[in-house]
């Protein structure tokens, strides 16, 4: 979790004014995190042969941690004072980023002008500038792309621990991914993608 914190901390709030900008930076952080896990996994496997944790499981847990951070649901407070301060800074940064995205989405001069009032009603923040609903929807819409990024460094033959994690009782086909027509459903009915896991929808203390 500390590794993905460190990578997400590199995102500068003043440079993020639209959802696409944020997605690029989150995917870069996820890709770096995934490659770190993939590089460390052989040593982990040698040391803990009977742990039962596959590479895909480790990636799924880290993916879920990233989702919690993005949505403001991260319960981990940090392991020392410096880490705690960095986590507070990261959350403050994300609030500012989603404020920028909210302003862009609800601007009558922006590309969403005709839907501005509807979007304003949906995402209007009543929680001290947290924009939780917007952050939740952003993650639901982009989790498939983030999963693709975090699994880039996984071996082609890496499989998820559940034998049939993809729709229709299918296995992951390579790099811990489902086909685009058989993955775990997102927020909308019929919305499927390459993600084989629901860890990001499981409370952090239960994972």
Image (cartoon, rainbow, N blue to C red):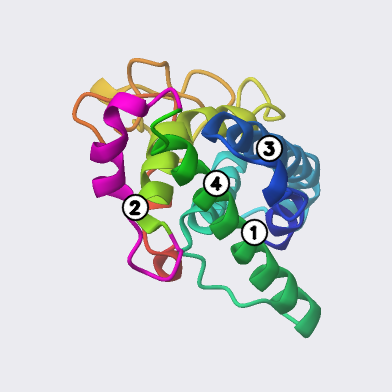
Q: CA distance from mark 1 to mark 2?
A: 17 Å
On residue 100, the disc is: 4
In the rendered view, tell whether residue 203 sits above or below residue 28. below
User: Which label's residue is closer to the chain start, 4 or 2?
Assistant: 4
Q: CA distance from mark 3 to mark 4?
A: 15 Å
Q: Residues within 10 Å of mark 3 (few under 14, many from 20)?
A: some
Q: Residue at point 74% right, 53% down?
A: 44
Disc 2 secondary structure class? helix
Side (left or right) of 173 relative to 154: left
Which residue is at the front of the view, 97 or 188? Answer: 97
On residue 93, the disc is: 1
Based on the displayed image, in which of its 4 quarters is residue 202 positioned? bottom left
Disc 4 secondary structure class? helix
User: Which label's residue is closer to the chain start, 3 or 1?
Assistant: 3
Q: Is residue 119 magenta?
A: yes
Residue 121, image x, y percentages: 24, 48
Q: Residues within 10 Å of mark 1 (few under 14, many from 20)?
A: some
Disc 3 secondary structure class? helix
Q: Please name the residue that numbered disc 3 is placed on.
A: 25
Q: CA distance from mark 1 to mark 4?
A: 11 Å
Q: CA distance from mark 3 to mark 2?
A: 20 Å
Based on the displayed image, in which of its 4 quarters is residue 85 positioned? bottom right
Q: Residue at point 43% right, 49% down?
A: 135
On residue 177, the disc is: none
- Quadrant the N terminus occupies: bottom right
Q: Residues within 10 Å of mark 4 (few under 14, many from 20)?
A: some
- Magenta residues, start to end: 110-130
On residue 133, the disc is: 2
Side (left or right) of 148 relative to 81: left
Based on the displayed image, in which of its 4 quarters is residue 184 positioned? top left
């Amino acid at each position: 979790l500390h590794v993905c914190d460190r990578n997400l901390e590199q995102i500068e709030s003043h440079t993020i004014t639209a959802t696409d900008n944020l997605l690029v930076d989150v995917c870069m952080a996820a890709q770096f995190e995934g490659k770190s896990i993939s590089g460390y996994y052989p040593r982990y496997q040698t040391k803990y042969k009977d742990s039962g944790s596959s590479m895909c499981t480790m990636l799924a847990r880290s993916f879920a941690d990233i989702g919690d951070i993005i949505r403001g649901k991260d319960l981990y407070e940090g392991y020392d004072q410096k880490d705690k301060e960095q986590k507070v800074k990261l959350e403050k940064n994300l609030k500012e980023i989603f404020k920028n995205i909210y302003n862009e989405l609800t601007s009558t001069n922006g590309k969403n002008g005709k839907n501005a009032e509807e979007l304003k009603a949906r995402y209007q923040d009543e929680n001290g500038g947290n924009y939780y609903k917007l952050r939740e929807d952003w993650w639901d819409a982009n989790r498939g792309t983030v999963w693709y990024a975090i699994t880039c460094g996984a071996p082609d033959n890496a499989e998820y621990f559940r034998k049939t994690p993809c729709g229709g009782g299918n296995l992951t086909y390579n790099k811990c991914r489902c086909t685009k027509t058989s993955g775990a459903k997102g927020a909308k009915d019929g919305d499927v993608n390459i993600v084989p896991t629901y860890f990001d929808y499981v409370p952090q203390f239960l994972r």
